[in-house]
Amino acid sequence: MPTMQPNARRADARVAARAMTARALLALSVTLLVASAAQAQLAYVSSEKDNALAVIDLKALAIVGHIPTCKRPRHMVITPDGKQLMTACGDSGQLDVIDLATRKSVRRVPLGEDPEAFDVSPDGKTLYVSNEEDGELGIVDLASGKRTKGIEVGKEPEGVKVSADGKTVYVTSEVASLVHVIDVASGKVVKNVPVGKRPRRFALTPDGSQLWVTNELAASVTILSTKDHSVIGTVKFEVKGARAADITPVGITMTADGKRAFVALGKANHVAFVDVAGRKVDKLVLAGKRAWGVTLNRAEDRLYVVNGLSDDLTIIDVSAAKALKTLPVGRVPYGVVIAE
């Protein structure tokens, strides 16, 4: 067998060293990429007309990508582990489950006709969705992906909220101006509560004692006691220079301590900062056209407002009560969620 010359041995050693260096750099790049993704603060905005989700880097305050999804994506929820995003697509009648690491759809689940808003049981096993065309609350087993039941409610149901103990589901009926209280164990409506005209969305106080309901055509929020589901209060909204008919509250969110609520006032183009204990508006902040969906970041120093008619997202500094920036996010944006 011929003996390898010293120059050849050195050349082979250099090639091997370069290969090891390349592998090390690749491994480091992957590690840095994973670490960067883990540290990223991203918002996702659903666009009903673009059939896509806009991805926003919250540190840079910039659009960093788009995720294609099914037709007319609306309400969204991020899974408790932060790894997946679920969105209900009204025209596809599906739930699209998106892996946030790859930004790709990994599963489609049938939801029935015209799904809009949904919530998930505390154990993560059951999804409750409003089916507007059928006038039902659909119940979906997430493990099997099957719709197991439909519970008849009032016409055009929209908002859906599950209690913290998972025993009760609340549903709004836009046409009937009712909140339907559904007992999960029996699968039956146990009470219908009259609220303001065209109720839309819900927020529960952190202690679970109060349910706040936005009334789009009554310029108000109705407050229910979850103990007996009686009406215990109302917050009325006024915006200087705006007609009452243009004050159309829809989206609502609350701080973790339950001291403040934020309500998007629709065609009034403002967000109301509401003192929960005093049940009064203490600030109004200008957003975009038809302020619709709202959410807070984890630090609760930024409020994100989706504007359905100006096709953008307004980012508000909460302490200053002032808009910081507006970003275009696609045609007819509906909702916004944050992954931190």
Image: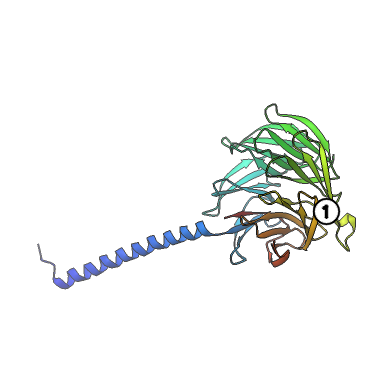
Colour pattern of the rendering = rainbow
Tell me, yes or no, if residue 113 can be seen here.
Answer: no
Q: Position of residue 335 (x, y in %)?
A: 69, 53
Q: Is residue 310 visible?
A: yes
Q: What residue is shown at x 22% (from left), y 71% (from top)?
A: 11
Badge count: 1
Quadrant into which the N terminus falls: bottom left
Quarter of the image with the C terminus in it: bottom right
In-image side of 234 versus 39 (left or right): right
Q: Where is 162 relative to 322, above or below? A: above
Task: Tell me the residue at 52%/59% (across/down).
Answer: 39
- Name which residue type carries label 1: Thr
Query: Label 1 neighbourhood size at 10 Å, few (<14), some (14-19), many (20+)?
Result: many
**Circle 1 sits in a helix, a strand or a loop, which is it?**
loop
Q: Please name whichever residue, 175 or 185, is drawn nearer the observer in this view of the structure.
A: 185
Apparent side of residue 239 relative to residue 133 in the rendered image (left or right)? right
Rendering quarter of residue 187: top right
x and y percent of residue 127 in the render? 64, 38
Q: Is residue 123 above or below residue 9?
A: above
Location of residue 119 (image quadrant) = top right
Percent position (x, y) of residue 87? 64, 48
Quick one: 150 or 250, which is closer to the camera? 250
Q: Residue furthest bottom?
A: 7
Q: Where is residue 222 drawn, in percent x and y?
A: 81, 44
Q: Nearer the viewer, residue 112 or 255?
A: 255
Residue in view at x 80 percent, y 50 percent = 279
Instruction: Report the residue marked by disc 1.
Output: 248
In the rendered view, does 197 fall on the left or right side of 327?
Answer: right
